Image (tube, rainbow, N blue to C red):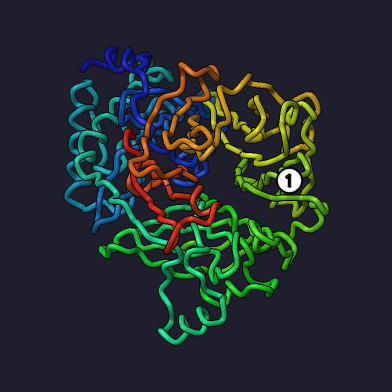
């Protein structure tokens, strides 16, 4: 391969044939120590190709950041690999950020990269992990750097893809908890505080070999509203363990969790949970406490932040979904849907303040009722982030740039993306430009690339339910480079026809 061939490679465009999760942009930035990036963009590639982020800080600095989708396993655990290719004052710098890689495989990866560079007629005066290369003036263009970065990414994928492993389905029925002792279970059961069939998980996040699961208190008899699952469990019935502890699950204690309806794990390993403060939601709703968002350390379970939302809601508020967003300068923002009030709550962590953004009346036109207001955060190729939203009963889909939400300047900024082909249930994103959804009452999951028009011909089926289950969440498993689906017979649960309990499953999305 000659340098010109590498340059031409950067201009190739391949159809994306997979729906692997996109790495969080803030994670890429935090793992890059060469420069302070000010702009990034996404380049499409073939199946299993990495995301490519192009940065430019000045006329003397040109960078290409490769965040590999393919992963390396270490002791059964899988990790991201980051590669930085940059040009500074006519010198090419290649730097890797690799976590959890066995030494032997790391060296093998580096030798293959060096071999590729050698084929391009380049030489290196330094060692394996940081390589400085002398470049001729015609090879320091951004185009050449991107091409070389893309070629290196393909080598990286070739050497590591064989280590990817599938996540076998994790299945459990009702509230299958790990109790401190048998007598505790008996006390809870006899007092009516534990009714297994009244418990169901609807949202999840994966961290290393664990899955955090939100268990809203829809019905009486749910002693735990936030739990973790061991994804490596070999038992036929997975066990739920209260997170971070049993005392944090106490109903009626406003310093504890009352009813967690959504959660989000960010790139800093912070677990954000939305606690609506209302229990027995599907039967006889009782407000125990004010709604709040609680931030936990995913590693230690320590409470890092509690955000009281009482000043942002009204008497009719019904909070449903939580989205966590980071701006280009690293500031954290929370977006929370308030279906009953036709609003989105915005909270600025840096400023320690929030406000309510009332959506245009057009958002509810054609709605029979203000039922479910779904949110989906999308990162487009151009680097902008958009919040997509729609009511279940609304005939149309809408979006708004997050930069307007952050400023509270939303007047005239909401974009109508057109009619929906039916009642769609948004169940998640790949943390990039793809949105996953299903039609109401149907098990098939579709993927829509938001870089394309919102039309049926751009919807791709990526998962079919094998047991007539309905998906409630599509989430990224970054450790294994997969999209995962949380499914259950939720429709039976709502009707009260689940027998011993709702069957819940975490499984790999079939065509991803």
- Relative to 273, say whether 46 is above or below: above
Closer to us: 368 or 155: 368
Q: Mark yes or no: residue 61 visible.
A: yes
Left/right placement of residue 82 relative to residue 225 reads left
Rendering coords of residue 211 (x, y %):
42, 57
Which residue is farthest bottom?
183
Rendering coords of residue 142 (x, y %):
43, 20
- Relative to 444, say whether 336 is above or below: below
Q: Residue at x 74, y 31 (%)?
A: 364
Figure quadrant of the N terminus: top left
Few, some or many residues within 10 Å of mark 1 (<14, 14–19, 20+):
many
Rendering coords of residue 62 (x, y %):
46, 26
Displayed quadrant of residue 443: top left
Q: Residue at x 75, y 63 (%)?
A: 290
Q: How many marks?
A: 1
Q: Name the element at disc 1.
A: strand
Displayed quadrant of residue 207: bottom left
Q: Mark yes or no: residue 270 visible.
A: no
Closer to us: 444 or 309: 444
Closer to us: 156 or 316: 316
Rendering coords of residue 398 (x, y %):
66, 27
Left/right placement of residue 475 relative to residue 130 reads right
Figure quadrant of the C terminus: top left
Closer to us: 151 or 419: 419
Displayed quadrant of residue 302: bottom right
The residue identified by callout 1 is 345
Q: Residue at x 21, y 33 (%)?
A: 158
């Amino acid at each position: 391969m000659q340098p010109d061939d590498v340059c031409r490679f950067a201009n190739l465009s391949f159809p994306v044939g997979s729906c692997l999760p996109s790495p969080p942009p803030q994670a890429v930035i935090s793992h890059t120590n060469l420069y302070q990036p000010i702009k990034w963009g996404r380049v499409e590639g073939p199946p299993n190709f990495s995301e490519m982020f192009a940065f430019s800080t000045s006329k003397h600095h040109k960078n290409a950041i490769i965040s590999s989708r393919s992963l390396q396993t270490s002791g059964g655990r899988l990790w991201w690999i980051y590669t930085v290719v940059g040009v500074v004052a006519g010198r090419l710098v290649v730097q890797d950020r690799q976590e959890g890689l066995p030494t032997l495989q790391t060296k093998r990866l580096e030798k293959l990269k060096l071999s590729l560079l050698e084929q391009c007629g380049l030489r290196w005066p330094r060692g394996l992990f940081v390589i400085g290369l002398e470049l001729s003036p015609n090879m320091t263009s951004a185009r050449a750097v991107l091409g070389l970065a893309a070629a290196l990414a393909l080598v990286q994928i070739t050497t590591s893809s064989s280590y990817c492993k599938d996540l076998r389905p994790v299945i459990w029925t009702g509230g299958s908890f790990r109790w401190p002792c048998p007598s505790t279970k008996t006390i809870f059961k006899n007092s009516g505080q534990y009714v297994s069939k009244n418990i169901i998980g609807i949202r999840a996040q994966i961290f290393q070999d664990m899955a955090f699961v939100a268990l809203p208190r829809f019905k009486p008899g749910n002693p735990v509203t936030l739990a973790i699952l061991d994804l490596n469990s070999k038992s036929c019935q997975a066990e739920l363990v209260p997170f971070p502890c049993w005392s944090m699950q106490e109903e009626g204690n406003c310093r504890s969790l009352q009813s967690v309806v959504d959660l989000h794990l960010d790139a800093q390993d912070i677990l954000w949970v939305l606690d609506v403060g209302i229990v027995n939601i599907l039967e006889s709703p009782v407000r125990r406490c004010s709604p709040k968002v609680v931030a936990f350390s995913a590693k230690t379970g320590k409470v890092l932040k509690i955000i009281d939302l009482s000043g942002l809601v009204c008497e009719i508020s019904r909070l449903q979904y939580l989205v966590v967003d980071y701006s280009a300068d690293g500031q954290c923002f929370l977006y929370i849907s308030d279906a009953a009030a036709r609003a989105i709550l915005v909270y600025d962590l840096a400023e320690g303040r929030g406000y309510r953004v009332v959506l245009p009346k057009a958002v509810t036109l054609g709605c029979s009722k203000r039922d479910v207001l779904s949110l989906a955060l999308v990162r487009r190729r151009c680097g902008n982030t958009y919040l997509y939203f729609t009511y279940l009963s609304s005939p149309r889909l809408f979006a708004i740039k997050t930069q307007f939400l952050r400023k509270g300047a939303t007047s005239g900024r909401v974009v109508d993306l057109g009619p929906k082909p039916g009642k769609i249930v948004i169940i998640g994103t790949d943390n990039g430009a793809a949105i996953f959804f299903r039609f109401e009452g149907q098990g098939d999951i579709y993927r829509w690339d938001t870089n394309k028009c919102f039309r049926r011909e751009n919807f791709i089926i990526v998962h079919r339910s094998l047991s007539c289950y309905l998906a409630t969440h599509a989430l990224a498993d970054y450790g294994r480079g997969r999209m995962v689906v949380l499914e259950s017979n939720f429709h039976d649960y709502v009707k009260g026809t689940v027998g011993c309990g709702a069957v819940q499953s975490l499984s790999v999305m079939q065509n991803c």
